[in-house]
């Protein structure tokens, strides 16, 4: 077993790799299975609404909003609730079981002839609310399962799960919808929630969380907000996340139109380019877990944030034959996928490190609320700006805006500061000159 020397002089054995830690394997597998099932549902439920229930555009808008509304309505409160708990795993299991039950009603209602748009909206709201509570409890629960020395590696593993789901989920959804029809394909999500709950139930690591004393929901929420705003590192991370997501969503709003109408990229290739981002995420998770051990999360974050504008700037300036466009877009998409995962992994690990245990759920909920809540504003701003300025100017503006995120990170305490050298002494004797030479002053 590897050993490390603590600053106190005590030799401490290094914890075993995560692949040998049973409880982390269960937690990681639970998240991977659950996320993959959700990716199937993201395609199956809208297709059910369009093809079987002939949903109108306004109804599709409501259905889409219902999936993200719980994060805005209950995001901050979920952190306060999770910080009041001494054990987070029971809440996580309950959330998965509630989501399982809600998803089960979709194929049942369809078979009974009862399925309609309001039903789908209600299911989306229930699953979305359970997901918000689950994420709030999962963040502090990770600290109980994974030792501090392995948390960056654990974060990388979770983000690798998202990359796997983004690559494999849509393809699996297509096969299931083709073979079972859209409503029955939702059964994949039902099974994924149930499997996740069973896997979580098998975790044996005891939780020794000391609940924060509650002073009421309003004050508890404000304590989380205050902790993020006052702490310079947490504040910089949140501000960078808001900046990145705002301009990323503004770019996403015009991306498809620009790729099809301006760059003339074939429709089939756009899906492949998006999938390459997921592949890059897998590579980024693998590389980040190893680089963090050598260079630390701070340095990786400082470097990663500099690369965020590369893909958007490339898209905005790209010209030439189709083979050149596809080659450059493939490379930048692969790199950006890795950079996004590297940034998100280090951001999570630093937040966990910098946040007091009794505030972890609230700080995570506050950051998530702000970073996710700005997505709708970014998409709206991107669409409106494109109507006024055109597609290419908006993409270039998004690249410039994305670069602003580096200012938040590089101006924070995450940037290493060289200690100021002591003033050079003035020699008063030969002995002083000899001493200065010994210490490198001459």
Image (cartoon, grey):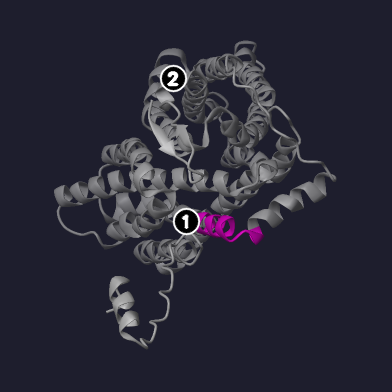
Main secondary structure of the magenta stretch:
helix
In the rendered structure, does residue 399 fall within the stretch colored magenta?
Answer: no
Residue at position x 49%, y 38% in the image: 10
Residue 50, how many percent across, how many down?
Answer: 52, 30
In the picture provided, is 30 more to the left or to the right than 165? right
Q: How would you rate the neighbour count of disc 1 (Cα within 10 Å): few for under 14, some for 14-19, many for 20 or more?
A: many
Residue in the foreground of this view, choosing between 237 and 150: 150
Q: Position of residue 59 (x, y in %)?
A: 61, 38
Residue range highlighted in magenta: 229-242
Tell me: residue 331, above or below residue 403: above
Q: Secondary structure at mark 2?
A: helix
Pointer 2 residue: 177
Residue at the image position 66 percent from the left and 25 percent from the top: 95
Residue 433: % across, % down: 30, 81
Q: In this rendered view, identify the residue nearer to me: 70 or 224.
A: 224
- Going 50% across and 28% down the picture, which residue do you hit? 35
Specify which label sits upstream in the sequence, 2 or 1: 2
* Residue at the spot of label 1: 244
User: Which image quarter holds the C terminus?
Assistant: bottom left
**Marks 2 and 1: which is nearer the front?**
1
Q: Is residue 416 above or below residue 253?
A: below
114 with respect to 274 (left or right): right
Q: Residue furthest right?
A: 216
Name the image quarter holding residue 231.
bottom right
- Residue 253 sits above or below residue 394 on the image: above
């Amino acid at each position: 077993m590897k050993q490390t020397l603590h600053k106190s002089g005590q030799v401490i054995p290094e914890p075993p790799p995560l692949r040998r830690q049973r409880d982390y394997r269960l937690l990681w597998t639970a998240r991977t299975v659950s996320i993959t099932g959700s990716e199937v549902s993201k395609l199956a439920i809208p297709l059910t609404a369009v093809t079987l229930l002939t949903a109108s555009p306004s109804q599709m808008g409501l259905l889409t909003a219902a999936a993200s509304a719980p994060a805005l309505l209950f995001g901050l409160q979920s952190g306060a609730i999770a910080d009041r708990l001494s054990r987070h795993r029971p809440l996580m299991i309950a959330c998965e079981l509630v989501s399982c039950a809600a998803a089960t009603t979709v194929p049942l209602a369809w078979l009974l002839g009862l399925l309609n748009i309001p039903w789908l909206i209600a299911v989306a709201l229930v699953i979305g609310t359970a997901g918000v509570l689950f994420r709030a409890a999962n963040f502090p629960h990770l600290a109980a399962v994974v030792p501090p020395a392995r948390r960056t590696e654990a974060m990388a593993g979770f983000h690798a799960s998202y990359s796997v789901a983004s690559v494999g989920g849509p393809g699996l959804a297509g096969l299931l919808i083709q073979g079972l029809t859209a409503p029955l394909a939702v059964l994949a999500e039902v099974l994924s929630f149930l499997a996740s709950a069973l896997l979580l139930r098998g975790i044996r690591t005891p939780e020794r969380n000391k609940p924060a004393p509650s002073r009421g929901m309003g004050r508890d929420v404000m304590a989380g907000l205050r902790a993020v705003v006052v702490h310079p590192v947490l504040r910089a991370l949140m501000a960078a996340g808001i900046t990145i997501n705002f301009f990323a969503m503004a770019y996403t709003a015009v991306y498809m139109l620009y790729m099809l109408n301006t760059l003339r990229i074939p429709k089939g290739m756009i899906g492949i380019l998006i999938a390459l981002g997921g592949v890059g995420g897998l590579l980024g998770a693998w590389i980040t877990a190893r680089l963090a051990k050598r260079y630390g999360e701070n340095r990786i974050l400082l470097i990663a944030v500099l690369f965020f504008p590369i893909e958007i700037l490339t898209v905005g300036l790209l010209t030439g034959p189709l083979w050149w466009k596809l080659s450059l877009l493939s490379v930048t998409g692969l790199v950006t996928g890795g950079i996004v995962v590297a940034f998100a992994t280090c951001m999570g690990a630093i937040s966990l490190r910098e946040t007091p245990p009794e505030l972890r759920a609230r700080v995570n909920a506050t950051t998530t609320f702000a970073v996710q809540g700005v997505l709708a504003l970014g998409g709206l701003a991107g669409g409106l700006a494109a109507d006024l300025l055109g597609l290419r100017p908006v993409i270039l503006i998004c690249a410039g805006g994305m670069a602003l995120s580096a200012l938040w990170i590089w101006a924070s305490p995450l940037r290493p500061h060289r200690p100021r050298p002591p003033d050079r002494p003035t020699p008063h004797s030969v002995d002083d000159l000899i001493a200065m030479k010994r210490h490198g002053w001459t």
